[in-house]
Amino acid sequence: MNSESGQTSRVPKVLVIAPSLDMLGGQSRQCARLLARLKEESSLYVEFLPVNPRLPKPFQFLQKIKYSRTIFTTLYYWLLLLSKAWRFDVLHIFSASYYSYMLSAMPPVLLGKILGKKTILNYRSGEADDHLTNWRTAIPSMKKADVIVTPSGYLVDVFSRYNLKARFIYNIIELDRFTFRDRSPLRPVFLTTRLLEPLYNVPCVLRAFKLIQDKYPQASLTVGGEGFMREELEQLARDLELKNTTFIGGTKFEEMPSLYDSADVYLTATNLDNMPSSITECLAAGLPVVTTNAGGIPYIVTHEKTCLMVEINDHQAMAESAIRFLENEELTRNITREGREHSRQWTWEAVRDEWVKLYHELANNNAELKEEKEKLKSRLQTN
């Protein structure tokens, strides 16, 4: 027994199951951060299994074909899961919602139950309420997990409405990756970086920017992110006669800090969300944020303290808030400095003990259970 940590000397074996950085998004970025930190922990043995593995070279052409990509990648992932899971004490499973949950998260939860492994369902989707309401397999399969962990109290509250017990451990932010700077005077240089899909309501951002540009003709907007709505959004930008508006596509994980540093105001009009890394990273970088009050966002930031917050789908209020930042230097300075301090609660140093303790508790409980089973088996054989 380690007297300082209260943990046994046994090293838990943890398999983290999540999207790799080949799939740009909040889950893959969070997984990359967590893995980097966990592999520094001498009290843990950690491996990674991507839910989107690259096929062996002779078959990689299949991942370039639209529908076969999903089929063959999923089958290969399941094969790797079957070959690896039995060697670990704890399966840490990142999870989104709907089909992603069914294909990527539900199989390791159920397999863990079959193999007698401890499972952590790390559910991260802001669409949980709809998922739990309308997908019959969701609640019964989630009850098979030993622990449900979410990134914020918002999803804890959602799960409680369905009699599912969850705890939250914040997403990780690495403050040293983001250069904080006071943006004074504030330039009308705007940024948004969300997937170009209906949930994130980028049309609202474009309409807000139209109102901003009517007052500040020199204003610019960079639209980061990919998605099936890109052509539609580019057309909307033309219809609104927006100037200085650039769609840059997806941005690599390592390039995000410089992208934030290039802007002076961040806009996000999402209709539903949980704990978006885009907002927490902006706070770390001193980039003032105008956001909707969707889902879990009010759980992590506060209007007029760490951001300016507006109602969902209100492009006029979003434009007014952005202009308020431009015209009130003191407000902007106070909010960005408070935001940087606020972001310290999301560092690895702040959440490390929660993850490490959870892994050890689950692994040791599993070891004790196995020992009890062996003792019972021995007694039965003796009798």
Image (cartoon, grey):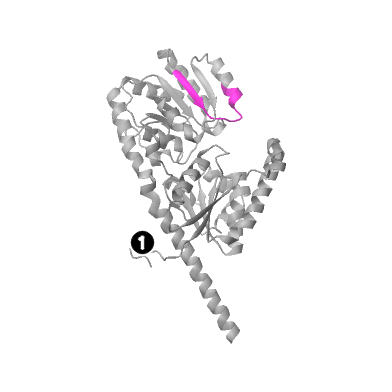
Query: Nearest the camera: 325 or 43?
Result: 43
Q: Give how far across and how far down residue 351 sits, in percent.
A: 39, 50
Q: Label 1 is placed on what type of residue? A: Ser
- Please tell me in which quadrant of the rendered image residue 237 appears: top right
Q: Is residue 323 visible?
A: yes
Magenta includes 222? yes
Q: Give how far across and how far down residue 187 sits, in percent.
A: 37, 19
Secondary element type, mark 1: loop
Query: Nearest the camera: 271 or 241?
Result: 241
Tell me: residue 235, above or below residue 147.
Answer: above
- Please tell me in which quadrant of the rendered image residue 342 appears: top left
Q: On the picture, is 329 further left or further right than 251?
A: left
- For the record, the magenta segment spans 220-233
Q: On the picture, is 109 further left or further right than 325?
A: right
Residue at the spot of label 1: 5
Residue density around tag 1, few if under 14, some if 14–19, many if 20 or more, within 10 Å? few
Quadrant of image for the N terminus: bottom left
Residue beneath the point at 56% across and 81% down: 378
Q: Is residue 163 visible?
A: no
Q: Give how far across and how far down residue 206 sits, in percent.
A: 50, 22
Magenta includes 163? no
Q: Which residue reaches farthest left? A: 330
Q: Which residue reaches farthest bottom? A: 383
Tell me: residue 7, above or below residue 221.
Answer: below
Q: Give how far across and how far down residue 94 sits, in percent.
A: 53, 48
Q: On the picture, is 296 further left or further right than 344?
A: right
